[in-house]
Amino acid sequence: MLTYLYRRGVGAVLTLWGVATLVFALLHLLPGDPAATLLAQSGASPEAIAALRGQLGLNLPLPVQYLNWLFHLARGDLGRSLFYSQPVSELIAANLPYTVQLALAALIWAALLGLPLGVLSALRPAGWLDRLAMASAVVGATVPVFWSGLLLIWLFSVRLGWLPSAGAEGWRSLVLPSLVLGYASAGPIARLTRATLLEVLSQPYITAARAKGLHPRQVLVRHAARNALAPVLALSGLQLGFLLGGTVVTESVFSRPGLGRLLVDAILWRDLPVVQGVALVIAGGYVLVNLGVDLISAWVNPQIGWQ
Amino acid sequence: MSSRRLSPSWQEVPGRPVPYREEQSPYGGVQGRARPAPVSLAPIPTHVGPARALVSRLLRRPAAWLGLVVLLLAAMGGACAPQLAGFPPDQIDLAAQLQAPTLLHPLGTDFYGRDLLSRLLYGARATMAVAGAAVALALSLGTVIGLLAGYSRGWAAQAWVALIDLWLAFPALLLALLVVALLGPGLRTLAMAVGFAGIPNYARLVRSITLSLRNAAYVEAAYAIGATTVRILVRHLLPGVVGPVLALATLDMGWAVLHVAGLGFLGLGAPPPQAEWGLMLYEGRGYLAAAPWASVVPGLAITLTVLGVTLLGDALSDILQPRARG
């Protein structure tokens, strides 16, 4: 088991290093000059632009910039934003909680919607509920988040005035964004729950449990659910990664602060250090979530892991 | 040529008992607990059959029909936009700002008084063309990378796998955003960004198929008679990959439309005067209270297109890779 942890840990660190390298490599092929872009509007002199380039270290050769970046990264230093004149790590720290909050709330919605629907569908396959649930799962994967979000804003904020359409104050402003995002990933959870539960329910030990006269609820909860849950758990973790990416769009729809908004604005303003930092945090979070999911699945179901 | 000769052995032949037929369902899955194992007497197809056989199997499914009709409507709307549209898509008419649907403007107008139906038709053009280009890019590069990754050995194979894994370690939207950050907004960038984000999915799929085909006797035979690597890859391994890749590409078209429109909605896709569905939503959201139709219309178009593609893609996956679905 320790070997497994060790190997997965080393793998994750290598992946994080690769992620950092890829982000750096992608963005340093930028044709534009961030210093010139930043100062162009203020009508700065070429000398001022050159000075800023020196200050940002953009004059150094690429390999030196890369090593510098890695060393600073290892110390948690992501550089300074060109736009906010604030360390990138502070910006990220200020925005990260909103994004994590949104992603977690969305995951709760997804589980609340997906798990019961999947279980009920599996209990009565081809019944009306099953058809309805699976059709709505397809719809959930089809409707773009940015459109369902607008529709809900129109209904609940504009017409009914029940919930705020923007901002991030209080739980009320979290309801709509997390519901929109959670619905999108409830579908896969419902489909997988249904599929694994159907498979588990067809196994001999379930027949045996039924044959010895157990109440159907007991068969479901004590016998079937345990085995059916492991893959669903793994998928939920993967969905959390997907949700981290999905927050980018959702935050824009609902004008919420967060990493996604920060990233989109930084791209529009060519705020290179912020783009780098946020991309790194999102991708790194995705890698770590996947690692955590693998470890939990291996722990829940010893058959899968430790090898 | 008779259809019998066209169809390979795995086609259902009259007289032979059909061991198992899937129930139709709107989402392409198979219903019922008592799903019989597909004990087919014929070998399971691993390559695309003749186009005619494929189409006839496809058209037996209502869901595929629906998807095909929706997709054809969108494609025709885009192709015939100049003939169908009542107005140029960027004709500004400030006297007709934010009008509700009327006979003159069947879907209403936006903030600049532009006719939404016309913009929708021209938008179909832009959105579908960009999404199609993105899928083509992802498919071709991903297939090449997958073939190389699956056929190479030793450290090269490991390097390919590491590259694909790294690529997959990024959320797709994030990758697309980074490419946009790199190249600046624009239709061409949009296609490249979404395509770039889609490459690793194909690479992974193609690699796994290539791995399973690599040791097949016919590939070894080709190697033994001295076929070059390129010839083995193109003539012997590529055909086995085409079917699953085609199914993935169909499903991916919906994914690509979602991402193209999503980037447009973020203001990082098509530049403003362009008629593109995501951009239309981006422009319409500011007037949600005054003109909800400006947001409803492009969103509905995106949703229906993606739904159509998904239904068609699900059906295609069912036919082309009967084993892959669980």
Image: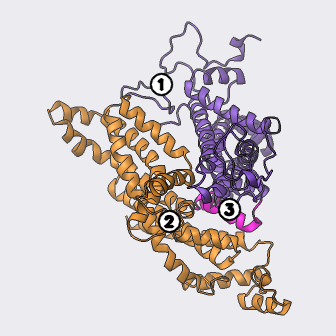
Query: Callout 1: helix, strand or loop?
Result: loop
Whole-number angstrom distance, CA of label 2 to CA of label 1: 52 Å
Check disc 2: other Cα within 10 Å, few if <14, some if 14-19, many if 20+: some
Check disc 1: other Cα within 10 Å, few if <14, some if 14-19, many if 20+: few
* Residue B241 position in % (x across, y down): 67, 38
Residue B177 is covered by the magenta coloring: yes
- The residue that disc 1 covers is B38
The mark that comes first in sequence, 1 or 3, is 1
Query: What chain does mark 1 sit on?
Result: B
Q: What amino acid is labelled 3 in the image?
A: Gly
Magenta stretch: dominant secondary structure:
helix
Q: Do pointers 2 and 1 mark residues of a single chain? A: no
Query: Callout 2: helix, strand or loop?
Result: loop
Residue B260 is covered by the magenta coloring: no
- The residue that disc 3 covers is B267
Which region shows up in magenta?
B162-186
Q: Is residue A150 left or right of residue A53?
A: left
* Residue B187 position in % (x across, y down): 77, 55
Query: What chain does mark 3 sit on?
Result: B
Q: Tell which residue pokes out farthest to the right in this image.
A: A46
- The mark lying in front, picked from 1 and 3, is 3
Query: What chain does mark 2 sit on?
Result: A
- Hue of chain A? orange
Which label was assigned to residue A166? 2
Q: What amino acid is labelled 1 in the image?
A: Pro
Whole-number angstrom distance, CA of label 3 to CA of label 2: 18 Å
Could you tell me which residue is drawn at 20 percent across and 36 percent down?
A216
